Structures are given as C-alpha cells and as structure tokens.
Image: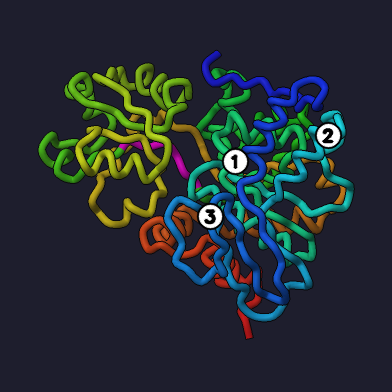
C-alpha cells in the first residue's frame, strides 16, 4: 500500500554500526550547554555558539533563547545530545529499553523537519517543564519515515503529530471516516498500540496539505478551488516535499480524487524552498501547509479542497506508553492542557512570527503559553 511504513528495530553495533551512525545523525543536531542560571549557549556543529540574542533564522527551529523571568523550577531545556544514540550503538540494547537512556531521565520531545513542527514541540516541551517534568528537545529529526521509528524505539518520547497523516502512514484507511477526528484518533490509537505508543487528546488546530498558487496565477486562470486546476494541470509544474509522490494525500490523492496529472513534479526539501519556487516561477503550483505564515501576507492563494481529499489533521501528541506510566496524570494533563487551547488561528500567527518576522522559536512558544495562562508571565 502507498504510505505503508514498517518500523525497524534499532540494531546494536555488532549487527550494523552504519545504521547506528544514521541514528546518531538524526538524533544529534545540536548540544545545549548550561552556563548558569537562565543563560544557555547553543552549540551548532560546524558553527559558532550563540547566546540566544541573535535573530532567529527562518526554518532552523533550534536557536537558543535567554529565559525570561525566574528559574522554571530548576528545569533545563536542552536540545538532545548525540551521545545518547552513541550509547545505543555501544551497548547493544534492544528496543525494550530506550537507547542510552535510564528511567527517570528527561522526556524527549521530537519534531519533524519543518518550522511548525518545531514550534509545536517547543510548546509541549515547555508545558512539561512548567509541570515539573524535565524535558528536552530534538528538533528537525526528519520526515515521518524517520520520526515514527525514532518514537517506536525510544529515541524520542513525545511527538506532536497530525491525526490523518499519521494514520495513513501506518495502514490502510479505506474503511475509516477520515473527516471524523474521533474516528481517526480511535484508529490511530489502535495502530500505534502495537508500538507501545499512546495517542492523547487532539487539538482543535489543524494543518492540512494544500495547493497554493501566486495571486497573479489565480487571477489569470480564475482559480479558486483545486478542481479549477483540471484544465491546466497538464501544462503546470508542481512543487512539494520529496515524499509527495509516495504520500496518499499528496500526488496519489490528487490523481485519484481530482484527476490531476501535472507536467512535472519538482522535489523541494523545505517550506522556504517551496515558497520561493512558486514565487519565482520555478513551479506553478506548490503543495504546502494550510497554516503557513506566508499565507497571511496575501501573496499566495490557497485553493479550496472542494472534494475533501485531505483528512482530519488535528494536532495531537503521541507519547511512548512507558513515559506515561512513569509520569502519570501530571504528564498527560500538561500535554492535554496545551491541546485544549491550541487553535488553527494560533498556528497561523505563530508560523508568521517565526517564518516571516524571524522571531525565535522558543521565545514564541513561551509567549503563547503565557497568553494561555499555562506558564506565568515574568515578574
């Protein structure tokens, strides 16, 4: 089936050291050193430390930030250190024990490799810290094909997921009412149970795949819906994530639900590359998220999904069962409190702040938590 994913065991060094090096690569993007109360330095491989004051670079999602206000119950937010995965390679532990991790260590919150996912991971991690649960971030791990095995094997403990996309990546959804978030959550919980992963309460906030064109293209061809592309698709170039040709709600879904056959597909690794490509005419149509901050600027037109191809893609934390057992209701309540307040409008605003205005991910995550009353304001 298109989109089916097999979750592998992480091998020990005797079995396959090369795969351990791969896991080291995806797990260890940066290390954060504690330099004293409230001040941290981010050390980026191949780069120079930053004190968190410099402007955030859109798409990075991992810059340090000076903490605001008093200490947060002594908790230290840290981007995951690659040594944890090296320990996996050295000791040959099985999947039953998270590699290089002992019970009681910090809860690791991971993200996919796009800015919104990093924002969500930071929000959930900071909420855990406020609840007195040590947490650290592993940002920009990669696409779902890497993040799901990382979660199943204990490289990360918590991932902010998208209901429908997560379910479709695991198994057939032919008999599931994908527009019903309750039904999708139930099936996702069943699918992940075999990996000892639990699905918590979803947020009202959703972010789907969407097709966008420039305002000039929309006006010239009178495009308002995805169906309107029908007479023009064969002469248009589509840009999207490299995984799009295999994802059921991307190219395969556009063919099946809308009959769209584009002249060519151009793989573009990051959101910024996709936006730049459609703006510069490299591609005519781009697959992008429906909560992108750039949509607020009015330069692009998001075409309506008039045949309802896209599933319910509510934001939802998925959590390793062992971590839930360790921290109990305190962890579940902290994550659910975020989901209960998170809206689609919030996502659009936060994405604009980070990707367009260049604000710091952690600062924006904390500011949102303060506005919701989850974290106290400084002073």
Label 3, label 1: how far apart the Cα atoms are: 19 Å
Query: Which quadrant holds residue 310?
Result: top left
* Number of the label disc, if any, that sits on residue 141: 1
Residue 209 sits inside the magenta stretch? yes
Residue 317 sits inside the magenta stretch? no
Measured from the top left, where is residue 229 in percent x and y?
22, 27
Measured from the top left, where is residue 121 in percent x and y?
61, 52
* Number of the label disc, if any, that sits on residue 47: 3
Q: Is residue 39 or residue 179 the one in the foreground?
A: 39
Question: Seen from this angle, which residue lies furthest top?
Answer: 1
Quarter holding the N terminus?
A: top right
Q: Earlier in the sequence, mark 1 or mark 2?
A: 2
Q: Is residue 75 or residue 41 the one in the foreground?
A: 41
Of the two numbered discs 3 and 1 in the rendering, the one whose residue sits closer to the viewer: 3
Write the start and end of the magenta stretch as one range: 206-211
Q: Residues within 10 Å of mark 1 (few under 14, many from 20)?
A: many
Query: Which quadrant holds residue 52?
Result: bottom right
In-image side of 264 versus 371 (left or right): left
Q: Earlier in the sequence, mark 3 or mark 1?
A: 3
In-image side of 311 versus 229 (left or right): right
Residue occupied by mark 2: 90
Label 3, label 2: how far apart the Cα atoms are: 27 Å
Q: Which element is circle 2 on?
A: helix
């Amino acid at each position: 089936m298109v989109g089916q994913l097999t979750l592998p065991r992480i091998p020990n060094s005797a079995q396959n050291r090369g795969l351990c090096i791969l896991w080291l690569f995806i797990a260890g993007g940066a290390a954060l050193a504690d330099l004293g109360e409230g001040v941290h330095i981010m050390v980026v491989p191949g780069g120079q430390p930053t004190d968190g004051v410099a402007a955030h670079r859109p798409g990075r999602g991992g810059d340090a930030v000076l903490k605001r206000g008093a200490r947060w119950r002594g908790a230290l937010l840290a981007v995951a250190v690659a040594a944890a995965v090296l320990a996996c390679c050295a000791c040959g532990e099985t999947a039953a024990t998270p590699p290089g991790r002992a019970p009681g260590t910090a809860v690791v919150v991971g993200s996919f490799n796009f800015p919104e996912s990093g924002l969500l991971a930071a929000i959930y991690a900071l909420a855990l810290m406020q609840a007195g649960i040590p947490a650290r971030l592993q940002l920009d791990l990669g696409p779902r094909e890497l993040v799901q095995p990382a979660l199943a094997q204990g490289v990360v403990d918590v991932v902010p997921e998208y209901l429908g996309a997560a379910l479709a990546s695991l198994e057939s959804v032919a008999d599931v009412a994908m527009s019903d978030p309750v039904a999708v959550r139930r099936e996702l919980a069943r699918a992940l149970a075999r990996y000892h992963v639990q699905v918590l309460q979803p947020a009202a906030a959703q972010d789907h795949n969407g097709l966008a064109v420039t305002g000039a293209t929309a006006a010239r061809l009178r495009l308002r819906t995805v169906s309107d592309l029908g007479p023009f698709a064969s002469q248009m170039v589509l840009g999207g994530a490299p995984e799009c040709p295999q994802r059921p709600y991307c190219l395969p879904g556009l063919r099946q639900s809308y009959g769209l056959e584009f002249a060519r597909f151009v793989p573009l690794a990051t959101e910024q590359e996709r936006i730049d490509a459609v703006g510069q005419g490299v591609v005519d149509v781009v697959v992008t998220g429906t909560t992108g901050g750039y949509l607020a600027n009015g330069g692009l037109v998001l075409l309506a999904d008039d045949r309802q191809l896209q599933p319910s893609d509510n934001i939802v934390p998925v959590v390793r069962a062992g971590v839930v057992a360790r921290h109990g209701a305190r962890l579940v309540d902290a994550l659910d409190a975020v989901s209960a307040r998170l809206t689609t409008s919030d996502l659009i605003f936060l994405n604009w702040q980070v990707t367009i205005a260049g604000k710091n991910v952690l600062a924006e995550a904390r500011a949102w938590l303060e506005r919701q009353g989850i974290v106290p304001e400084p002073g």
